[in-house]
Every structure is written in structure tokens, then in C-alpha cells.
Amino acid sequence: MKIAYHPCYAHTLPAGHRFPMEKYELIPQQLLHEGLVNQDDFFAPAPVSMDDVLRVHSSDYVQKLLQLQLTPREQRVIGFPQSEALVEREWVITQGTISCTQFALQQGVAMNVAGGTHHAFTDRGEGFCLLNDIAVAAAALLHQYPNWKILVVDLDVHQGNGTAEIFAGSQQVFTFSMHGRHNYPFKKEQSFLDVPLEDGTTTAQYLQLLETYLPRLIADIRPNFIYYLSGVDILDTDKFGKLKVSLQGCWERDKYVFTTCKQHNIPVAVSMGGGYSPSVATIVNAHINTFKAALNTWF
Ligand SMILES: [Zn+2]
């Protein structure tokens, strides 16, 4: 299975920063350590082209990012201090999702060890997101196959508000977001389908909703391609999640999504999304489970 990873994914943030950056370095190590994949499965993306970025993001916003001209307020909303290195990181991650798309077309599935930057809007970023990797990749895929339909399955606990805004009203890219009703972002956008979850939603309730809506969406839309945002902040251990989904339940979620895609012969590119359990080992294990579920399903 092809996996996008570049050392810049694990960029060092200022001491005490609340974003858990270590996982990006630990996940590839753990995948190799457990013998799940080989070094050859990894590829290091180059930065995304301007043509690809500008299919989604406004040129004013992109120039502001590249020239490090975000205001202090804009940086606070994003949550990262602006720097050339962080901009470079986001450009590389975004290309990772574009390249995963091409590998998924050949092999059924491919995974980016980052991305899922679904809080990036057309003309602004927030919530640790500068560019919307899935949106840029979906737009590039439509450029390649103008008549295709694409489904974004966003199961991160936070609503995919940026992706919803970018594809609002689109007849080709459909956004499905299952997220905590009372979680960030507090002002939600309208996805093609939103399934807001109450605080304390259990594994059984969660899986039942997913198993109700995903097949229905696939039957209605008949997508040629799926982007899956596999955030592990749905876990009961998560600091921000507010849900009660077990580690096993999170694995079952991933397995269900992949099995459904495979059954319908729909290629899927996976972006990892968030995860804020206090123990980094829990975060890494949950993400590793997503890789295992994909490997089990296709290879
Ligand atoms: Zn999240």
C-alpha cells in the first residue's frame, strides 16, 4: 500500500504547543516496526503546484500564506505561528493527498500520514488547517475526470466546515460529515449530509448511524471516488471529542468504511485527521488500526 510521508510532516513546534505533532513521526516508525509495510511503500511528496491549489483557494489568501502576511488574529484562529516551514509542510501534505488519489486509482486505497485539513476554507484557515488537502485533491481529480462524482466521508469528530463551504451546492463533490454536535467548530457549515452526534454517543450508536447513512449515500450518489477523513478524535479517551467510542469501535468504523468502498469497487484515499487522546500511544495505535484495516481489506 502506498503511503505519503515526508519528514516535514513532523515539524517541530514551539515548546508547549498544544498540537500533537509527534504522531506524524511515530506512525511510520510503528508501521515499519510491526512489519505492516516496507520502506518502499512510503513516498515523499513534493510541494503541491500552484495550479492545483488555486482550483480551490483564493489567490489573495494563498499569497498571504506564502508571503507570511497573516495577521496575528488570523494566526490565532489557525493555531500555528506562521513560518515558511509550516507553509512548506502544508504544501507537501496537500500533494500527498493528490498523489494518494493516483495510487488509489491503481491499487484501491492509499493513505497520507497527515492531512484531513478540513477546517481550511476557500479564503481562510482555522483549526490547524491552512490548505484543504482533500478539497484540493478532489478538484484535481475532477480536472482529470470532469464527469466524475466524489464523496467525502469525514468521520473526524469535528465538522468538515471548510470542505462543506468549498463544495457547497456542488453537483460533483458531496460532503458527508458525522461530528460532535457540541464540538468545534461552534458555527457549523452545511455539508451535503451532516450527522451531528450527541455528547456521549456510544460505539453501538455511532456504528449504527454510519451503517445507516454511508450505504444510502453511495446508492444515491454512485461516487467514482471516495476521500476518507479518518480522525481518531471520536475515541472515548479524546480530550476534545465528547464521544464514547472505544478503540475497538474506531477500528470497526475504519473496517466498515473500507469494506463498503471495496464492495462497491470505489477507490479511496485516506487523510488521517485529528486525535487528541492524552497518551500519544493511544493516538498512534488508533491511527495504526486504520492502516491495518486498509491493508486487511485490499492486500
Ligand atoms: Zn478533529
Image (spheres, rainbow, N blue to C red):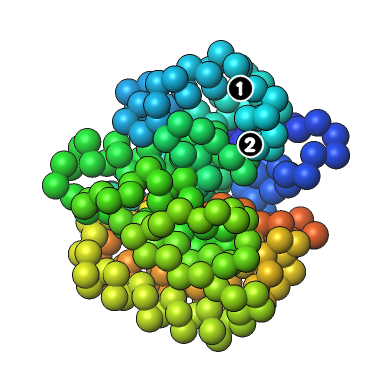
Q: Residue 261: image x %, image y %?
A: 33, 67
Q: What element carries label 2?
A: helix
Could you classify mark 1 by the number of other residues whose Cα lies within 10 Å: few (under 14), some (14-19), or many (20 or more)?
some
Who's the residue at 67% across and 65% down the image? 241
In the rendered structure, are the residues bearing label 1 and label 2 in contact, judged by CB atoms less than 8 Å apart?
Answer: yes
**Amino acid found under the numbered disc labelled 2:** Ile
The residue lying toward the viewer, choosing from 194 and 144, is: 194
Location of residue 187 (image quadrant): bottom right
Of the numbered discs 1 and 2, the one sitting upstream in the chain is 1
Could you classify mark 2 by the number of other residues whose Cα lies within 10 Å: few (under 14), some (14-19), or many (20 or more)?
many
CA gap between label 1 and label 2 equals: 10 Å
**Amino acid found under the numbered disc labelled 1:** Leu
Query: Residue pushed farthest front?
Result: 187
Q: In this view, does 87 lie above or below 193?
A: above
Instruction: Say left or right for 62 vs 36.
Output: left
Q: Say which mark, if any, is on residue 78.
A: 2
Residue bearing mark 1: 70
